Each structure stands twice: as structure tokens, then as C-alpha cells.
Image (cartoon, rainbow, N blue to C red):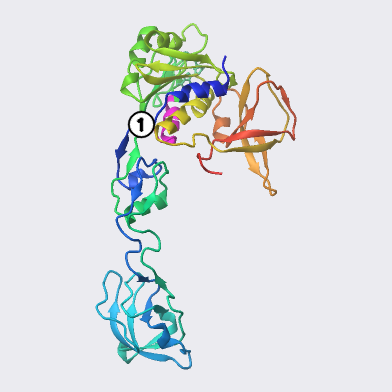
Amino acid sequence: MITVEEARGIVLSDIRALEPERVTALESIGRVLAADVVSDIDVAPFDNSAMDGYAVRAADVEGALEGTPVRLRVVEHVPAGVFPSMAVGPGEATRIMTGAPVPQGADAVVMVERTAEEDGGAVAAIMAPVRKGENIRLRAEDVRAGEVVLAAGEVVGPAAVGLLAAVGVAQPLVYRRPRVAIVATGDELVPIEEYPGPGKIRNSNSYSLAAQVLDAGGEPHVLDVARDNFEDSVAILSRAPEFDVMVSTGGVSMGDYDVVKDVLERIGTMDFWKVAMRPGAPQTHGTIGGTPFFGLPGNPTSTMVGFELFVRPVLLKMQGHTMLDRPGHAVVLAHDIKKKPDRRYFLRARAARQPDGTYVAALSGAQSSAMLTSMHRANCLLVLPEGESFFSAGTTVECIRIDRKEGSE
Ligand code: AMP
Ligand code: MG
């Protein structure tokens, strides 16, 4: 048996980012940029008004008050999207809308609420002074032409999508999503649509794993179920080189019909077979035709925890991410927990934030690895280290927040 750290070291050691591809700006959400994004333009491209109102010369309206307005001759109306054709001279103003370019000569904008129209719009009565520069957004105040606005390695969020559009990058270069083959194994499995006959169960792991792949940014490909015999398993696992990663579930422990390990040794290479953890000690890793292969355990929660700890970081690394771990934090146990000392436990729990900012965690239900409901209710996995067997209520331990993304606090 190897430790969780050793297993993680092995599975991540040969993983590199996949080749980049061009996608649309919107499709780049959540992806990692493979190249710097450089602006072809100043943002804002011209000095423009932050308000609907009148572009004026601040010196003209210094003494303006509600009782004693300053009257200015309106030389032009400029909506957003139109470039002004008239300069604003002394005693003059231009009616201007938010986002419209500020005309020559004007150095401030008075908001419309502090003005009144007179003479059918030919005159603006200004009823408050403005500082020079007030309500004007300056050219290049956000981005300069030629500037790197988004750097290679950054994860694209909604604001970055907006920036891509603002600087005209319609097809950003991002790392490709891994294509992940999912292979369930077992003679007992029937499809989701079927009511299971005697001795049968529905294949839930293909679904939870496919969902985990999607959640990690990968592209799930659910292959045919491998029945519990060598030939069938060889036929399906041999398809690994069509994909970037292959994940199987079940058939990897000590049962009479557990053939995954034998098949892996026959058609690929095997790095390890058992990890000192619970749930999910028997699980294997290796390569088939050069494709990384994960033989995850069959029990529904074991397979999900194995994916969390080993497959998810690999998929993230392939997509160019450098933060490969979910965030975690300390929690105070709400009750006693007993365990065996030989392994590290990952227990399904709910952490609740207390008014003082600390967290208290309680198990989210029974911990049988065959049960999924407590996994569904969990927002974290408690990490209980090997070497210890009893944790009393009030003890502080670490947890992994399975409800939070890498990079969040
Ligand atoms: P195994 O390691 O193949 O013996 O599987 C361990 C347990 O997980 C058995 O009770 C299986 O029936 C169950 N199991 C295996 N594969 C799946 C699956 N795809 N969906 C749901 N349960 C499964
Ligand atoms: Mg099986």
C-alpha cells in the first residue's frame, strides 16, 4: 500500500497541459489561457461622458446655482455612438448622453438633473458648478493599446470574457479539455432506464463519474459496460488510446471476477494497486497505450472519492491549471469519531460556519462506501490522518471542501 501523497505524486508526474485550441470568447469561460491577450485598442477609446447632461467649460459655470443659473447656448446634441462635430466655446454647451465622446473645448459634464432646458432646447440653464474633468471618463483609463490585459495561465471568468470582447479577441487560445473515457464493470449492472431484475443494480457510477468529469472541465465519454470476464474487459479497456484519460469503476479488488488489475498488467503498465485510504483502498493506476488509466473502486462513494483525490487534479493539470486542489480549512468535530489507524480516512461531512468564523463539522450520514446519500449531503470530506484511531468531539481536523472550486477561499 502506498500513501495518498505518493499516489498523487505518481498520477501527476507525467501529466502536461494538452495542446491549446481556439474557441469563441464565450466558450472560453472556465478555461485556462494558453497565450497572453493583448489589446488592439485603448479602452475607453476616447474621452466620454459618464452622465447624461451637458458638456461645458467648467470655468463658465463656476457661479451656477439653482436660484442663479448660468445660461449656455446649446450647439449640438450628441448621443452615444456619434462623434461630435462642433467644439464647445465660451458660453456654449453640448447636450451629451452617457458614453458619447466629449466635444473639443468642453472639460466637464453637468448631469441633466442639475440643468433645465429653455427656448425649446436651444439654451441650457446650468444650476450647479462642476470641477474640471468631472463626469468625464478618460481615454485608456481601463486598458492601453498594446497592453497585456489577460496573461497566459489565467483562468477565464465572466469579466475576462467581457475584456476579450472589449479588446476584440473573438477566438482566444485556451488549453483543450481532456476527453475522458468512463468504463463501468460488472455483470450486475443495468442501464438507468431499466428496472433491475433479481441480483441486478443500476449503473450509477458511470453517471456520477461523468458528472465529476464535466465538473472538472473534461469531456466524458461513457463506453459500454465491461462484463466481468477477461476478454470483454480487454476489448473495452484497449480503447484507452482513443482518449486522454480512461477511468474504470469496479472489478479492481479481491473478488473472483475482479479482472481490471490483470487486464491492466496484460495490456498496459501498472504503477500501484492499493492506496492507504478509506473509502477506496483498492484502486489501480497505470497506462494503456500511453493513456493514463485509473481503475477506481466499484462502491459508489469510493469511486467518487478516488476521482476527487486523483483524477480531478490530473484533468485540471491537463487543462493548464496550476491550482489543482480544492480549498480546505480547519473544522472542529461536533462528535467523537473512531477509525482504524492504518489508513487515512475521508469522511463525508457538513461543515457549518459559526458566528466567530470557525467551522463545526458533523458527519453527513452513514459512511458505508456503498451509500451515496451521505455523499450528496456532504459539503466536505474530513481528512483523518493515518496513525490515529480516535478523535474526540472538539478536536480540530482539516477538511476538503468538495463544494468549492480550486482557487476560491
Ligand atoms: P466491485 O469492486 O466490482 O466488486 O464493486 C463493488 C461494489 O460496487 C459492488 O457492490 C458493485 O455492485 C458496486 N458497483 C460496481 N460498479 C458499479 C456501478 N457502475 N454502479 C453502481 N454500483 C456499482
Ligand atoms: Mg464488480
The residue located at (67%, 37%) in the rendering is 331
Main SS, magenta residues: helix
Q: Badge 1, how many Cα within 10 Å: few under 14, some, many 20+?
A: some
215 in the magenta segment: yes
Instruction: Decide: is 305 above or below 143.
Output: above
- The quadrant in which residue 15 appears is top left
The residue located at (68%, 19%) in the rendering is 341
Closer to us: 53 or 49: 49
Closer to us: 257 or 321: 321
Place of residue 327 in the rendered image (x, y in percent of width and height, measured from the top left): 56, 38
Place of residue 79 in the rendered image (x, y in percent of width and height, measured from the top left): 30, 74
The residue located at (38%, 18%) in the rendering is 225
| Residue type marked 1 | Leu
Q: Mark 1 points at which residue?
A: 18
Q: Quadrant of the N terminus?
A: top right
Q: In which quarter of the image is the C terminus?
A: top right
**Circle 1 SS class:** loop
Instruction: Decide: is 129 above or below 221.
Output: below
First to last magenta residue range: 206-219
- Whether residue 204 is visible, yes or no, is no
Instruction: Decide: is 343 above or below 381.
Output: above
Q: Which residue lies furthest to the front in this view?
A: 146
- The quadrant in which residue 361 appears is top right
Place of residue 85 in the rendered image (x, y in percent of width and height, measured from the top left): 24, 78
187 displayed left or right of 119: right
330 displayed left or right of 19: right
- Whether residue 152 is visible, yes or no, is yes
Place of residue 111 in the rendered image (x, y in percent of width and height, measured from the top left): 42, 78
